[in-house]
Amino acid sequence: MTNVSFTTSIFAVMLADFQETRFLFKHLSSRRLRNAWKLYRSFKNQNRFETREHPMPVALSIEPTTACNLGCPECPSGLKKFTRPTGHLKENLLDNLLGEIGEDLIYLTFYFQGEPFIHPKMNELIAKANQRGIFTATSTNAHFINDKSASAIVNSGLNRLIISIDGTTQETYSSYRKKGKLEKVISGTKTILAKRKELKSIFPRVYFQFLVVKPNEHQIGDVKKLGKELGVDGVHFKTAQVYDYENGNALIPTINKYARYEEGKNGKWSIKNILDDQCWKMWHSAVVTWDGRVVPCCFDKDATHEMGQFGEESFKSIWRGEAYTNFRSALLKSRSEIEICKNCSEGTKVWA
């Protein structure tokens, strides 16, 4: 496998259209490509993991805030069920992080928990990464997009804007997006698309994300139609994670292809995942919370597996440190014994 074919393969899921792919390859420096290739080789050769020389991640999720205006039933942020505090990412934390690993990063997601655009300087944060040639993405409920903020979003250089729209009628939409207003989602979508056109920009690419659950599965065709009418760049259908599933759950879709779970002969439900003792995420990406905690992945929503505190120590020392090494080793030994891995989508179909 050549370096180019490798890079194309690992970002095939991330990049949805020509403009995104062109941006990626335009900024794919020899250093980033070399780091990515070394990382892939390290992953394929997991049992000979060398902490001292382990390459840096090519992708990172950083959390602008844990605050959220909605109350979605399977979201600890919306339900205010965190044990960790609510707060906003400080600019100097991002500056220091990009200063250390920005030359190796290829893809940066400004999202973990919370609604990103509640952060008062969200667009300034995006611009810092964009200026370094890093592909940037975020996910939003679109309630904070107006004419002024849309201009700032476009001017920030954001590459991908994912808009959560889980219903095409207010009744269906709010059955999951508690406290949400569908009209604000549609208005925000129209506004950002109009502003992108007005400013003669190709970015951000705008995608609808439809989280398929039983109450909204009858509107799959409707949201495709709505996306086409509004002119979004694509509509993506995501399977839903639920927490209490062993005895069934009212949110699990009846359409099998959109469900992460299946019912066994004994009437008990289980995740469609054999939980192989490996995980690409542990090699190529990490998550940094708003206050600098480095955690293994997006399934550790309450940061229970803290690998280290960025700011008190360097990212490289955390990434190559004892806690991360022990966590990777435990995963390779028995992924099913790690609590956050038991309901993980690694190895299952997330996008349907």
Image: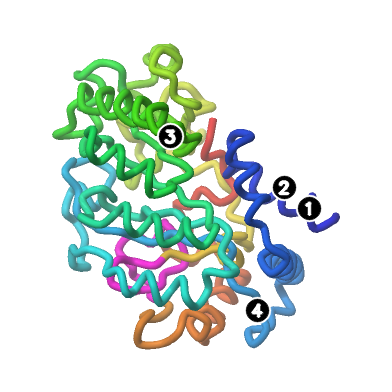
Q: Is label 1 or label 3 in front?
A: 1
Q: How many marks?
A: 4
Disc 3: CA contacts within 10 A as few (<14), some (14-19) or many (>=20): few
Q: Which residue is mark 3?
A: 267
Q: Secondary structure at mark 3?
A: loop
Prevalent SS, magenta region: loop
Q: Which residue is nearer to you in this view: 79 or 28? A: 28
What amino acid type is highlighted by mark number 1?
A: Val
Q: Is label 4 or label 2 in front?
A: 2
Q: Which residue is mark 2?
A: 8
N-terminal-most mark, 1 or 3: 1
Q: Is 237 placed above or below 315 here?
A: above
Q: Is 102 placed above or below 164 here?
A: below
What amino acid type is highlighted by mark number 4?
A: His
Q: Position of residue 87 (x, y in %)?
A: 19, 64
Q: CA distance from mark 2 to mark 3?
A: 42 Å
N-terminal-most mark, 4 or 2: 2
Q: Position of residue 333 (x, y in %)?
A: 61, 72
Residue range in magenta is 288-306
Q: CA distance from mark 2 to mark 1?
A: 6 Å
Q: Which residue is mark 4?
A: 54
Q: Residue at x 60, y 33 (%)?
A: 17
